[in-house]
Amino acid sequence: MSDIIYVSKETFEQLKEELHRMRTVDRPGAARAIAEAREKGDLKENAEYDAAKESQGILEARIKKLESELANARILEADSVDTSKVSILTKVTLTNLNTRKQLTYKIVSEKEADLKAGKISINSPIGKGLIGKAKGEVAEVQVPAGTVKFMIDNITV
């Protein structure tokens, strides 16, 4: 994975904490589980040992992926975000022209996306459709249910 991901400082710190926990707590725990399973006898027919080794492999893959993400992460500060058009870390108030319902979303990286909290990924269909649009523009977004038109009402940080 060599794609740059843009995150807020808080998310970057959370990723660092998660990596630290994996290295200092989870990795030694996986090693202990392997050692305990190894003590139980013949490794050829030891399902507990096989499960512990598989778990360790999955953990190591997650650590490697997180290290890569952190290496490619770029921290965006809210005060440096341009609010003349929709971009990552902007909060967008829009109106669904089909239903006349007004919505507010914050455009974030995939790592931070949480629809219940009103945070949508920059790579989601709606996120992609809104990027680069200015206040007053209509964005036509292709979603699984068809095309939805959104009027950009406001853009803030």
Image (cartoon, rainbow, N blue to C red):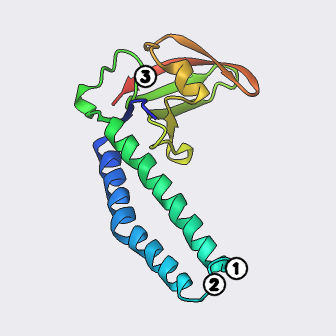
Q: CA distance from mark 3 to mark 2?
A: 66 Å
Number of callouts in the render? 3
Q: CA distance from mark 1 to mark 2?
A: 6 Å
Of residues 122 and 102, the one drawn nearer to the viewer in this rendering = 122
Instruction: Point out the tag, 3 or 1, that comes first from the N-terminus.
Output: 1
User: Three-letter amino acid code at disc 2?
Assistant: Asp
Q: Which residue is mark 2?
A: 42
**On the picture, is 142 further left or further right than 35?**
right
Image-quadrant location for residue 150: top right
> Can residue 156 be spotted in the picture?
yes
Q: Which residue is mark 3?
A: 154
Q: Which residue is mark 1?
A: 45
Report helix, strand or loop for mark 2.
Answer: loop
Q: Which mark is residue 71?
A: none
> Can residue 7 be spotted in the picture?
no
The residue sitting at 62% across, 72% down in the picture is 50
Instruction: Point out the tag, 3 or 2, that comes first from the N-terminus.
Output: 2
Q: Is residue 137 above or below residue 33?
A: above
Report helix, strand or loop for mark 1.
Answer: loop
